[in-house]
Amino acid sequence: MFSRAYKAAVTVPPLAWVIAFLLVPYLLMFCYSFWTVSSGNIIHHWNLGNYGDLLTKDVYRATLFRSMWIAARVTAFALLLGYPVAYFLSFYAGRRKDLLYQLVIIPLWVSYLVRAYAWKTILGTDGVLNTLLQFTHLTQHPINSLLYSPFAVVLTLTHIYTPFVILPIYASMEHIPRNLVEASHDLGATPRQTFWRIVFPLSVPGMIAGATFAFVLSLGDFLAPLLLGGPSGIMISNVVVSLFGAAYNWPLGAAISLCMLVLVVTLLFLAERLERRWSYT
Amino acid sequence: MTALLSIRDVAKQFGKTQVLGNISLDVAEGEFLTILGESGSGKTTLLRIIAGFEQATSGELWMAGQRLDPQPPYRRRVNTVFQNYALFPHLTVADNVGYGPRIAGVSNEELASRTGQALAMVKMTEHANKKPSQISGGQAQRVALARALVNRPKLLLLDEPLSALDANLRRQMQLELKTLQREIGIAFVFVTHDQEEAMVMSDRIALLKDGHLEQVATPREIYARPATTYVAQFIGHTNLLPAIVTRGAARCGALTWRTGVPDGTAIFSLRPENIRPAVGGEGVRFRARVKQQAFHGATELLQVECADGLMLTVRMAGNINPTGDIEFQFSAADAFPVRLSESN
């Protein structure tokens, strides 16, 4: 139908783009991760030292675990907040459904940076929250531990990624035929029993998709910890950034990045398998 | 005949649209009642009101001496077989069937025995561990039936349960359903748009048109003595003869027959099979020309034209192959007076 030349003309440019700007950089990173740095020079001497450091040095291990722990909390909170919203939207919003759906989407149009900064002005020593607490005499002095803590990072990331959890759950609920709910009532199940036995199991694929989004996106987050995390809220991406920047240890940075990549791809693969295992509708 | 379910003056409006207007209908114990009607006649809405998925705008439902309509669906001793079966896709066939008893909190032994019996009743025992996506439409239909009957309802509602099946399987299921209903003795309220299906299965048919009951009667009666022009045309074929009655004689074109209808205008329904080639004896005779034949196997439907241009449909045995000008006759008693349906 199309000539060879035409086919080549449409396929080669995007392919070349992906190779040049995705595969080659990955390949370079892969190579770098086996090299070392000595007095500011990169030594092209192949060894597993970087990976050894990752496993043995507490700094990296601790940061990686902290990142996963923060991501896990963000995921849990986003699910707890997002699930009821999605359920209400899908089953009880009625005519206001479209409007409310837009209200979930609109925050996504606001720049991530703006939303992160907003939390900075809310949580800071002279921030909105502390001012309010002092004004109402709930506290005498500003609470300094609000900002620059893992708490601030978890709060901000939960705020930012909850819509990513709501949307897939909502989508999976929209796929539940409503006559299943009627059939359940017909067979004697109360609305509560119907929720736990029918709606909840059938919304699991959406929950897995949403949880994967929230976990993967917050695991690799770099801005929220940078702006709001302080020293105790540093995450693995901040380490990578400093290794590629001020610390000038590209090989170690590359090794960490690759580990993260493998971790995330494995997670996505497992999530996909799980999702399919739970899909019926 | 004791009424199991009593529908009293039930009306339903969606916004400004009147879907059901003052329906009153009794369902007897152990009866097979069919609600028959075209799409948009309100038959599914009526069923959903009985099941509790919709609330009537006005009117009452009574069951075994108690008001039914204030009860939520999960408290009603009524179960439904849904049009598309609505089997729970994440549960096995056995868990679908056991859903009701499990919710009711029966013991594990009772759950197993009742589920087993229900599956055996619909011959689905060997498929107990399959998921709904792994069985055929006919099998899903049986599972839906078992899932409803396992709860021992007082009344079973069936919403066009056979419409998704192909013609042969449908006929087979019609007979199976009817036999099953006789055996277990539970009252069935069956909704369908298929008049043949209604005739085959029902003890009584309630014919619904635009949200109003046109007639409630046994299949034989509704066929032989249709109340209105709509009923006469909807159930089987008929000839509608607009006639003028003067002193006990009805006249429609060249045809004249004796009738007990008072003087004035009247419409008579004359079934095609009640018109026969003239063989002598009592009857109204007329000559007509065969214009069209439609062969149906055992019978044949003829379009015949009388001398004055009146067109009639005649049903004859399929092995005659009549042509040309023929003398026909019918018995005056078979011309049955019917009321003119509103907006028909």
Image: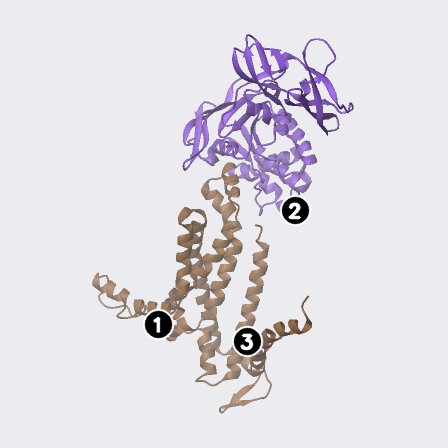
Chain colours: A brown, B purple
Q: Residue at x 45, y 43 (%)?
A: A192
The chain carrying label 3 is A
Residue pointed to by mark 2: B134
SS state under label 1: loop
The chain carrying label 2 is B
Q: Position of residue A45 (x, y in %)?
A: 59, 88
Q: Residue at x 65, y 27 (%)?
A: B179
Camera sees residue B183: no
**CA gap, disc 2 and disc 3:** 43 Å
Residue pointed to by mark 1: A148
SS state under label 2: helix
Q: Position of residue B148 (x, y in %)?
A: 57, 35
Name the residue nearer the viewer: A239 or A115: A115
Name the residue nearer the viewer: A163 or A76: A163
**CA gap, disc 1 and disc 2:** 55 Å
Count of marks overlaid on the render: 3
Q: Nearer the viewer, mark 1 or mark 2?
A: 2
How many other residues sit within 10 Å of disc 1, few (<14), some (14-19) or many (≥20)?
many
* Upstream in sequence: badge 3 or badge 1: 1
Q: Is A259 positioned to the left or the right of A106 in the image?
A: right
Q: Quadrant of residue A34?
A: bottom right
Q: Are marks 2 and 3 in contact (CB under 8 Å)?
A: no
Q: Position of residue A25 (x, y in %)?
A: 56, 79
- Identify residue type, mark 2: Gln
- Identify residue type, mark 3: Leu
